[in-house]
Structures are given as C-alpha cells and as structure tokens.
Image (cartoon, grey):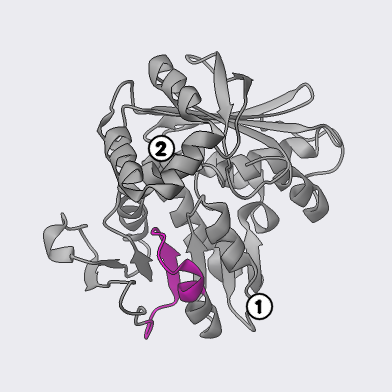
Amino acid sequence: MLIIGGYGAVGREAASALVPHMEVQVAGRRPERARPVPGTTAVRLDLSREDPVLDGVDAVLMCAENGNARVAQAALERGIGYADISATPAVIDSIAQLHPARGTAVLSVGLAPGVTNLLARHIAARAPGSPIRIGVLLGSGERHGRAAVEWTVDGLGHSPGSWEANFPQPYGKRTVHDFPFAGMAGARAGLALDSRPTTALLGALNRPFVAGLLQRRPGLRRAAVQAFGAVHLGSDGFAVTVQAGAVTASFQGRRQSRATGLAAARVIRSLPDLPPGIHHIDQVIEPVPFLTALAGEGFEVQGLDAPTSGTGASRAESSTAREGGR
C-alpha cells in the first residue's frame, strides 16, 4: 500500500502501525531529507508535478492536501482502495462528488472528522432527534504538521461564535469556538486548545474580517501559519466530546497525530471488507468495536453503552449526525 504524505506527523504513525501487516510505501517530495520510517520503502512523489504510480498498489492513504480528488479518482478507477485524513470541507466534497465504477473510498478517517463521526453515530441512536454538539480540544503543546497548522489558519473567521463544551477530566468545561469542521455539516462543532490563553487568542482571531484578510494577503497567511506553528504552549493531550440531549460520549488521550494515524491505519486494514463506493467512516464502520479497539492503543473512550433502541444508528441516522456537526 502507498501512503502519500507519509513523512508527516500523521503519515508516520499510520505507516508504523501498518508495517507489521503489509508492505508499505511512503511517498514524499524529498524522502532523502526525511527521517526514515523503519520497515517501509521510500518513494519520491511531487503531486504538484506528477501523479502517483499505482502499479502493484492495493490501497492508498492520503495524508496530504494536494490533488486529493485526482488521486482518489486514479485509485478508484483501478479498483484500489482509498482513505483520506483531510478535515477540509472543500477537499472532502471534491472526492465525495466522484462517481467511481469500482473501488472503495473512505473519508473522514482522522480524529475530527472521524472519531467524532463515530461517536455522533453512536449517540444519535440513543438520543434520536436531539441536536448534536461536537467539542474538539487539541493539545497546543504538540508539534503538529504544517498541513494541520494551515488548516487551522484557513478555518479562522468562517464560523464565528462560541459556546461551552463539557470535556472529560482533566479538562472539564471549556469555551470552544465554532469552527468549519468537515464531514458533519449541520451539528454545531467547536474548537479549543488545551492552553486557555491560546484558546482565547483563537477566539479573538475567529472573525470574518480575519478570514478576509488572510484570503486577500498571502503574505499575511504565511506569517500566521508560521506564528501558529511556533506556538507550543500547553501539552500534547487532546479530547473530543459529542453531546445529544443528555447523552454524551468522549474520546481522549495524548498526541492527536498518533490517534489520527492509528485510526487511518485501521480503516486501511478494513478496506477489503467494505462495500464499493465513496463513504464517510460512520457509514461503513461500526462505532463500538472500532473505538474500543482504538482505545486499546492507549486512549480512553467513554459513553459507549448500548443504545436505548436497536443496536446502532442506521445509515439515515448516521447521515443526520454528520449533518449536525463538524
């Protein structure tokens, strides 16, 4: 299988998790400059200039944002499985609009969207019809990859507003700022950082005029990305919480990049058993076994008790949950 962007924070974690199970190729623009990923084969790939060579590849994990729909189309036309960690709505929508004749693609395979989708699907069955709120708290002390920092900067100002979310301990109640998370348009989703001062700064910048400035002035955007990337206040802890009525479920731990990489690796291993077509993770993955297994990697999940009726959300309920959140 091929991991594009495999030398980034998430790609490395996914590659390390997949090496014991399959042959893994790790692609990047300058693999000779990157720290090797043990057990993998390095591949030079610059998506701004070329398409990936997919001969002999049975699955692609996309951990970059550069021609995602083009790569997905190329994979699916060959019957090659595809998974994507992107949290950018435009990127996800561009892939969801493809019409593959064969092949399976799974979107929203990270922490948020991803784990959040599965938690939302689970509690939607326990509180049908209740509005869903999704809180995402990321550790501002973790050294996130450039793509993650760019996503944060590009999301500023598009969803102004804030509210209180109840995270599991040690975080408790925190102010979260509305943010344009992809994958569950309709539920209210908010972002906080574990450092309260950095969260306050995030809120101060989450204004429409800031979004306009960043769009009109590329130099200012580059400076903002550099500044956010240099801030490492806080810890590497993270937590996500999903609430519908009086029902709450959460997932937490350390190193969000590791959680995303491990979740993506599990999706890759599941691809051969999934139906053809393009799906969000919550449409084809059962929440309880997936999240329970993921928690076994050193994370904590709460609120996965049985739904009050039935054994899980239907696809329609899953879609409703997604349309109510990130």
Residue 101 drawn at (x, y percent): 64, 84
| The furthest residue to the left | 32
Give the class, few, some or many, for how many residues have Cα within 10 Å of label 1's Cα (few <14, many ≥20): few
Front-most of residues 306 and 106 = 106
Which residue: 77% across, 38% down? 124
User: Across the whole image, how many numbered discs are drawn on residues?
Assistant: 2
Sequence-first tag of 1 and 2: 1
Q: Amino acid at mark 1?
A: His
Residue 156 showing in the rendered view: no
Which segment did they paint magenta? 54-72
Spatial CA span between label 1 and label 2: 32 Å
Query: With 36 as the anchor, is 177 left or right in this view?
Result: right
Residue 79 drawn at (x, y percent): 54, 82
Name the residue carrying label 2.
256
Which residue: 22% across, 57% down? 37
Quadrant position of residue 249: top right
Front-most of residues 186 and 111 = 186
Name the residue carrying label 1.
99
Residue 157 drawn at (x, y percent): 53, 36
Query: With 250 as the anchor, is 211 left or right in this view?
Result: left
Q: Please say if 144 is above or below 31.
A: above
- Quadrant containing the C terminus in the rendered view: top right
Q: Please say if 11 is above or below 213.
A: below
Q: Please say if 301 is above or below 93.
A: above
| SS at badge 2 | helix
| SS at badge 1 | loop
Query: With 215 as the anchor, is 311 left or right in this view?
Result: right
- Quadrant containing the N terminus in the rendered view: bottom left
Q: Amino acid at mark 2?
A: Gln
Residue 70 drawn at (x, y percent): 48, 75
Give the class, few, some or many, for how many residues have Cα within 10 Å of label 2's Cα (few <14, many ≥20): many
